[in-house]
Image (cartoon, rainbow, N blue to C red):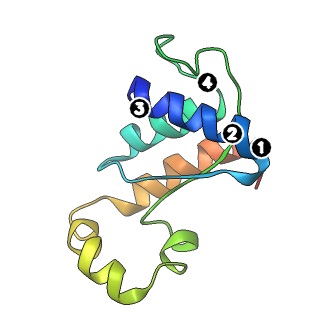
Amino acid sequence: MDLENQKRVKDFADQYGPENVVVIVGAAEGEAAGLAAETVTAGDPTFAGPLTGVQLGLSVYHICEPEIKELVDPTVYEEQISMMEMVLDVDDIIEEMSAIREQYCKYL
């Protein structure tokens, strides 16, 4: 997660309260999704951005996870996401995201 997005997430958590913020990521592989998820829950693991040492514990999901997919209008999901979903290892992504949530999320 780039430094600008880290700042945005931190600002939203400060403004609305971390219990009211849900982060949706769309990385193409489990490891990248997990890194973004770890950043918004446990803090920036690269120690380079605004979330260094900041444990927000935010709820975080990948757009392809069933919990989020069912909330999106099916037509929009089909148009915007389904093509990419066909080439992703969705099971790996779900496993990675679930592990991060179990370990670091404070607000589920």
> Which residue occupies 71% across, 33% down?
56
The CA span between labels 3 and 1 is: 20 Å
Q: Is residue 105 visible?
A: no
Residue type (three-letter) at the residue carrying disc 1: Gly
* Mark number, residue 17: 1
Nearest to the eye among marks 3 and 1: give it: 1
Residue type (three-letter) at the residue carrying disc 4: Gly
Nearest to the eye among marks 4 and 2: give it: 2
- Nearer-N-terminus badge (3/4): 3
State yes or no: discs 3 and 4 in contact (Cβ < 8 Å).
no
> Which residue occupies 28% across, 68% down?
85
State yes or no: discs 2 and 1 in contact (Cβ < 8 Å).
yes
Left or right: 38 as drawn, with respect to 102: left
The CA span between labels 4 and 1 is: 16 Å
Q: Quadrant of the C terminus?
A: bottom right
Please, what secondary structure does the residue beneath circle 3 have?
loop
Q: Residue furthest top?
A: 47
Please, what secondary structure does the residue beneath circle 1 have?
loop
Q: Which residue is mark 2?
A: 13
- Nearer-N-terminus badge (3/2): 3
State yes or no: discs 4 and 2 in contact (Cβ < 8 Å).
no
Q: Which residue is mark 4?
A: 43
> Which residue occupies 23% across, 66% down?
84
